[in-house]
Image: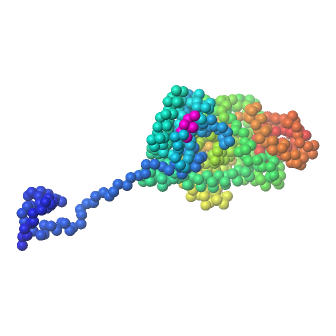
Amino acid sequence: MALPLPRQQDNSLHQPTGHNCQNRTVSTGTLDATNLGYLTSPPEGYGRGPTATRPQLLQLSSLGPKDFERLCFRMTRLDATVEQCRFYGVQGQAQKGIDLYARRHDGAYMVVQCKRSSDAFTPGEVTEAVDTFLAGDWAVRARTFVLAVTANLEGTQAADRIEQERPKLAQRGITLVVWDETEISAILKDHPRLVDDFFGREAVRVFLGDDGAAALTDRLDAAEVIEYRKSLGRLYREVFSRLERGVHGDDRNVPLDDRFVVPDVLVTDNGNPAVPTPQAEVPILDPMDAAPSSAASSRYFPDVTAGLRNPALAAAETRSSPDPYGNRVKATDWLGTGNQHLVVGVPGSGKSALLRTLVLDVFADESRLIGHIDRLHGLLPVWLPFAFWTNAARKNPTSVSVLDAVRDWLHAYDHGHLWPLIEKALRDERVLLVVDGLDEWASPDLARLCLDRLEVFAGTKYASVFASSRPFSSAELPVDGSRWRQGTLAPLDHDQRLAFITKWLTPLVAEPTLWRRRQPHGPPRSSRLLTYGNCRTSHCSCSCCCAAANSRPSSPKICMPC
């Protein structure tokens, strides 16, 4: 039976004939009840819920003072016009109103003052920061003054004070730039890696979205980097301390990074190592190779490469004159460019010590050696002795990859629990693979095989590699010269020798009781300190020199006549 349709203003049911409503035709007049059945059927689609707005501000106040300075440092380096950025001063020094300074390509300087506070940054503090900077020496050189604060300076009082201070700087030819919570958050919107490093992966997901977090899957997040640096740094420091004991024995052990003198390297214009000047071949005998190892020496310096080293290299070597030529550059500066570096040096020249010191410096909270090398900041070092790698490959021919070798080395030191973390680090673009002793191998074939795996790993993972070796021929080790930047360790110059003497002997001279145990005639006078260029060509029976040679046979050595 047809029902009369009531007259209502609801146009959804009262439409002109032929109008489509919900893909159904509704006519005027009377409708059969079955025509209204679509009202009770499930919806054919779905709408969108409330819009979830992403947070636009990062909680900068949650960072510690040092971490906020590190963040400002990384942000300063984002400027394409900046060629170098460095911290200014150390703890306890007057910083003259700045924390960072950066030199641009045109020679102009930009300085940054970092102010981390848990509450608001008052207008008076803005004025104080500007006045302190203008009273310092950098007001003469800088062209841009950046005031970086963790607070939000959008309030009217703070904004007015900023504009009042701007002309004061402009009169001196200085531009004022303010980085507050809003500005820093806006800059970091385009840099998910910085957000990941300082705030963690969850902050990336919330602040930048799921896609931003998914793009960083193969990268250690902030928490993992902290654990990596803590655990692996402690392991490497303990292992290296066993290999670099110093001249003072157990009771006067000075850490390696406290007594190391950064050497120079000799490179040619094409980046390859300097070639020694052709002279008559002279056999060079290493007294340390010929001398029998004492019980104390073997306890601290086990010959872990016995039976692994190439017999031709283990014997007395014949080399050209040790006076090479080439461009002399600081080793750390040389490492600032390129991704694959090979440092070459004769036995006892300090190759391994250089590698170990650089690894420890990367793990240090405050770097001493690489602070001015932007490319080396934030790297994740992984240590791998080449002798261990080739020996492991000899025992297990199916285990020759870089990952296999690093995992086996960790297990050898009872730190296999760190492998999942390091395995992920080896996929990170920040990994620095440090391979010590390419000249130490179980067999020539295994050396070539492992070197091939190393170069493939570096090429496909875009990893940085730093390796060391004695001088070698292309027949012994076919290194791809187009990939590696090779440098030869240079002899220490006068200033480096003086620093070497001071660092190694100051603790000894400062401890008379220790000196009496070694020299019955009492402590030496500074005027009796002598240096000589190469212990291989000059014999010294002084017990102090022998102690230095036994612990670290490095040129130049110290002779202290009795």
| Residue 443 in view of the camera | no
Residue 129 drawn in magenta: yes
The residues colored magenta run: 125-131
Q: Is residue 361 in sight in this rendering?
A: yes
Residue closest to the far bottom: 1
Seen in the picture, residue 8 relative to 138 is either above or below; the reply is below
Residue at horizontal 81%, vertical 35%?
Answer: 532
Task: Compare residues 90 and 480 and report the one nearer the observer.
Answer: 90
Q: How many marks?
A: 0
Residue 182 lies in the magenta stretch: no
Quarter the C terminus occupies: top right
Q: Position of residue 553 (x, y in %)?
A: 77, 43
Relative to 268, 190 lies left or right = left
Q: Main secondary structure of the magenta part?
A: helix
The N terminus - image quarter:
bottom left
Q: Position of residue 410 (x, y in %)?
A: 64, 57
Residue 245 vs 139, above or below: the answer is below
Foreground: 356 or 161? Answer: 161
Quarter of the view holding residue 112: top right
Instruction: Give me the residue at 58% from left, 32% from top.
Output: 134
- Towards the viewer: 238 or 136: 136
Q: Residue 70 at what x, y percent from top left?
A: 57, 44
Residue, x 51% and y 53% (percent of image)?
200
Q: Is residue 43 above or below residue 387?
A: below
Q: Is residue 308 left or right of residue 197?
A: right
As drawn, 33 above or below 489: below
Rendered location of residue 499, percent (x, y): 76, 37
Q: Residue furthest right?
A: 521
Is 485 in front, or is 37?
37
Q: Residue at x 46, y 37 (%)?
A: 160
